[in-house]
Image: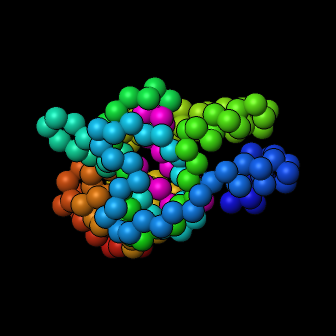
Amino acid sequence: MKKFLIDTFNISEVDANLFSECFETINLSKGENFVSYNKISNKVGFVEKGLLKCTLIGAEKSVVDDFVFENQFVANYYSFLKQEKSNKEITCLKDSVLRVITRKKLDRLSKYPFIEKIARQVSEQLFISTSKKLENLRLLSAEERYLQLVKANKRVVNEIPQYEIASFLNVSPETVSRIRKKITISS
């Protein structure tokens, strides 16, 4: 985690040590929630090992919003910032090891300038990611969105069930199957 913090946020080793020491290690089993629906999210996790999915839960349906792999932060950032009940759940797709910091500990660290730098960069990345996801949903075909997902992380094909990928892409599982067959034939 320290190396990730130094490389990603360009902070000193001293700051990376200070920050990472405030995290606790937790082990979650496949199917276990990191963030539960309708509860206020008061923690941010860093995935050391494993795979999680974020599911938006609505009155009529639920959809996969994102997948989170190793060396990525995970949280319901909206619930965390606004201190409102979570409209999503974040669930382990396989056994996972996370480093977790609570809102209370993060607030205590806010006096350090490097925390503001990290928070700003994380917020910017979330904004860019969300904007790109909306743009892709509106402008790209299902096949193009699938290829982008696989390009971003090749493990998607082997580690995530087809119906979860379909939910993320906002298509049917049959569409994902047709896309996969078409890609296999043209390869």
Highlighted range, magenta: 66-80
Residue 66 x, y percent position in the rendering: 40, 49
Residue 156 x, y percent position in the rendering: 42, 65
Nearest to the observer: residue 73 or residue 159: 73
Q: Residue furthest top?
A: 82
Residue 103 x, y percent position in the rendering: 55, 38
Determine the residue positioned at 85% across, 51% down.
14
Give the position of the N terminus as an image quadrant: bottom right
Give the position of the C terminus as an image quadrant: bottom left
Determine the residue positioned at 51% across, 63% down.
26
Q: Residue furthest left?
A: 60
Nearest to the observer: residue 44 or residue 186: 44
Q: For residue 77: magenta? A: yes
Name the colouring of the figure. rainbow
Residue 75 x, y percent position in the rendering: 48, 45
In screen coordinates, is 59 left or right of 162? left
In screen coordinates, is 2 left or right of 24? right
Determine the residue positioned at 43% across, 40% down.
41
Q: Can you say whether 80 is above or below 25 in the image?
A: above
- Choose top left, top right, bottom left or bottom right for residue 119: top right
- Choose top left, top right, bottom left or bottom right for residue 150: bottom left
Q: For residue 48: magenta? A: no
Quick check: can you spot residue 136? yes
In screen coordinates, is 131 left or right of 186? right
In this figure, what is the number of numbered marks?
A: 0
Quick check: can you spot residue 183? no
Determine the residue positioned at 29% across, 58% down.
164
